[in-house]
Image (cartoon, rainbow, N blue to C red):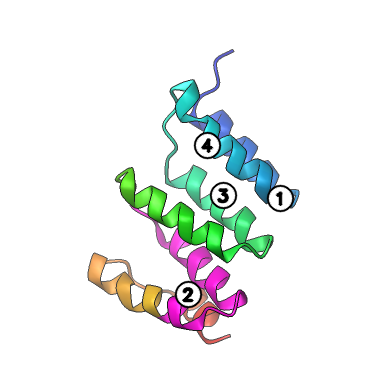
Amino acid sequence: LCPDVIIYSAAVSACEKGGQWQRALILVADMPRQEVRPNVITYSAAASACEKGGQWQEVVNLFAEMSSRKIDPNIITWNVAVSACEKGGQWQRALSLLAEMPLIEVIPNAITWSAAVS
């Protein structure tokens, strides 16, 4: 059985649910070595694992990695990033992300606004 993006994304999601943000990052890093390209679902799950683990810097790093791989974040990824920055006391970065969203045609939703003003 060769792992594909669906299997990796499920494993990363399991790490997120189990509070294993480090393992989630290891899985994402392993994907290119296995010739599997992460997608927005993979990155969103990894970012969520890091956010739950209080690792806002890792969420920002994942965001940058997505950009370098030409993977567009979806509203879930944006919400996780805003929330992670807010929880990490990085309110300026959270507001900067919020301001950036409409520029790339992503409309903040109630979850985004709630995370930004918490």
Q: Does the magenta portion include 47?
A: no
Decide: few, some or many residues near mark 1? Use Cα within 10 Å; few <14, some 14-19, many ≥20: some
Q: Name the amino acid type tagged 2.
A: Thr
Distance from disc 2 to disc 3, alpha carbons, whole Å, reads: 17 Å
Mark toward the viewer: 1 or 4? 4
Q: Give me the residue at 44% from left, 64% from top.
A: 78
The picture places residue 3, in percent across and down from the top left corner, at 55, 21
Residue found at the far top of this picture: 1
Rendered-image quadrant of the C terminus = bottom right
Q: Which residue is tagged 3?
A: 45
Rendered-image quadrant of the N terminus = top right
Q: Give me the residue at 53% from left, 64% from top.
A: 80
Q: Does the magenta portion include 87?
A: yes
Q: Looking at the image, do the residues carrying marks 3 and 4 touch, with CB atoms under 8 Å apart?
A: no
Kind of element beneath mark 4 = helix
The picture places residue 115, in percent across and down from the top left corner, at 54, 78
Q: Name the amino acid type tagged 1.
A: Lys
Distance from disc 1 to disc 4, alpha carbons, whole Å, reads: 19 Å
Q: Which residue is tagged 2?
A: 112
Q: For residue 85, which numbered disc appears in the image?
A: none
Disc nearer the start of the sequence (1/4):
1
